[in-house]
C-alpha cells in the first residue's frame, strides 16, 4: 500500500485556501479543504482559485473534510462559493466540517 498526499496552496492574496487529497495506491481516499477565504480586495483571485479547485475535483461527489481554522473573513468567505453549484462544477456534498475552537 502506497499513501500519498497531494496538496495545493491556492494563491488568493491575503487569506488562506489550501486543498488536498490523500491517495492510496493512486485512488483518492480523502479529499479536504483547509480554510477558503481572502480579503475582499482579492475576491477575484479567490473565486478563480475556487473554480480551479472545482475543475480539479470534477469527479468528486463529496468533499470529505472542510477544516476552518477560525472565523475571520479571510479564512471563510469563499466557503459558500466552494459548495455552490455553478457553470463549472456540480455541487459538492460535504461530509465533515471541523471548526477549531480555543478556550478563552
Image (cartoon, rainbow, N blue to C red):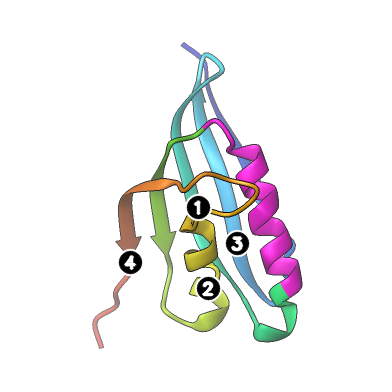
Q: Verify CB contact (< 8 Å) between mark 3 and mark 2.
A: no
Label 3 vs label 2: CA separation? 7 Å
Crowd band around label 3 with a 10 angstrom C-alpha radius: few (<14), some (14–19), many (20+): many
Query: Which segment is the magenta one?
Result: 44-59
The disc placed on residue 48 is none
Crowd band around label 4 with a 10 angstrom C-alpha radius: few (<14), some (14–19), many (20+): few
The disc placed on residue 33 is 1
Residue identified by numbered label 2: 75
Q: Nearer the viewer, residue 54 or 102?
A: 54
Pointer 1 or 2: first along the chain? 1
Label 3 vs label 4: CA separation? 15 Å
Residue identified by numbered label 4: 99
Label 1 vs label 3: CA separation? 7 Å
Res 57 quadrant in image: top right
Helix, strand or loop at label 3? It is strand
Residue identified by numbered label 3: 17
Crowd band around label 1 with a 10 angstrom C-alpha radius: few (<14), some (14–19), many (20+): many
Q: Verify CB contact (< 8 Å) between mark 1 and mark 3.
A: yes
Helix, strand or loop at label 2? It is helix
Amino acid at each position: 500500500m502506497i499513501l500519498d498526499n497531494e496538496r495545493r496552496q491556492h494563491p488568493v492574496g491575503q487569506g488562506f485556501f489550501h486543498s488536498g487529497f490523500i491517495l492510496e495506491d493512486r485512488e483518492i481516499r480523502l479529499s479536504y479543504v483547509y480554510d477558503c477565504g481572502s480579503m475582499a480586495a482579492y475576491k477575484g483571485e479567490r473565486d478563480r482559485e475556487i473554480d480551479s479547485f472545482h475543475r480539479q475535483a470534477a469527479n468528486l461527489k463529496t468533499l470529505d473534510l472542510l477544516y476552518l481554522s477560525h472565523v475571520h473573513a479571510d479564512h471563510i468567505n469563499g466557503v459558500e462559493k466552494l459548495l455552490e453549484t455553478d457553470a463549472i462544477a456540480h455541487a459538492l456534498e460535504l461530509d465533515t466540517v471541523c471548526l477549531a475552537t480555543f478556550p478563552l
